[in-house]
Image: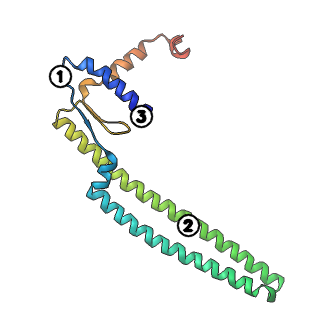
Amino acid sequence: MNWQLRIGVVLLLMLTSAVAWAAPLKIGFVDLDRALRELPEAQAGATSLNKQIAAKQKEIEAKRQQVNTFQKTLERDFPHLTNAQRQEREARLQNMILNFQQFQRQAQDGLNYQRNQILKNIQDQLVKVVSRIGRAGHYTVILNDKSVLYVNGAIDITSQVVAAMAAKPPSDKVNGGK
């Protein structure tokens, strides 16, 4: 069990005693990995991303082939070239290799950006749906395997924590309460 989940469970248990007299505690759990696998939006996003990846792979392979062809031609012609021609073609090959590597990095960055955007949009929708279900189902807390997705405002003690922190003498804040 990771530390965030442990802290969440401990806080939840502490809050249980405080909330027990007010209303029954209702806890929900969402398996985000399963939701992302099963959601039509996620499947459509994966299909779209896979098409983009395949297209970029074709472009990358075509550029790789150009570099390899030029390199083989240079190796074949090398003994017959003058020093100036050798230097010019070697410089051209280096430039082609650098351009290829830059293209490859940009393609990867672009695909990563697309994947992150798709995931962000789906996660934003998930959070809205979970909040709506939380309110409608009168849940106190809805968790996932990494964090809390929804908390009923009745158990929010943030104001108390802020007030307690503000009430500490200035020396306690600087010295860590010693």
- From the top left corner, tell me how far across and down residue 103 is, in percent: 56, 68
SS at badge 3: loop
Q: Position of residue 90 (x, y in %)?
A: 74, 77
Mark 2 or 1: the one toward you: 1
Residue corresponding to mark 3: 1
Disc 3 packing (10 Å; few <14; some 14–19; many ≥20): few
Under mark 1, the amino acid is Ala
Q: CA distance from mark 2 to mark 1?
A: 57 Å
Residue that extends furthest to the right in the rendered view of this protein: 83
Q: Is residue 143 above or below residue 160?
A: below
Of the image marks 2 and 3, the number of the one nearer the N terminus: 3
Q: Quadrant of residue 50?
A: bottom left
Q: Which of 69/161 is in front?
A: 69
Left or right of residue 18, residue 5 in this image: right
Task: Name the residue at 41% across, 34% down.
Answer: 1
- The answer for how far apart the CA atoms under marks 3 and 1 are is 28 Å
Q: Return the residue at label 2.
A: 104
Comparing 13 with 107, the one in front is 13
Dot 1 crowding, Cα within 10 Å, few <14, some 14–19, many 20+: few
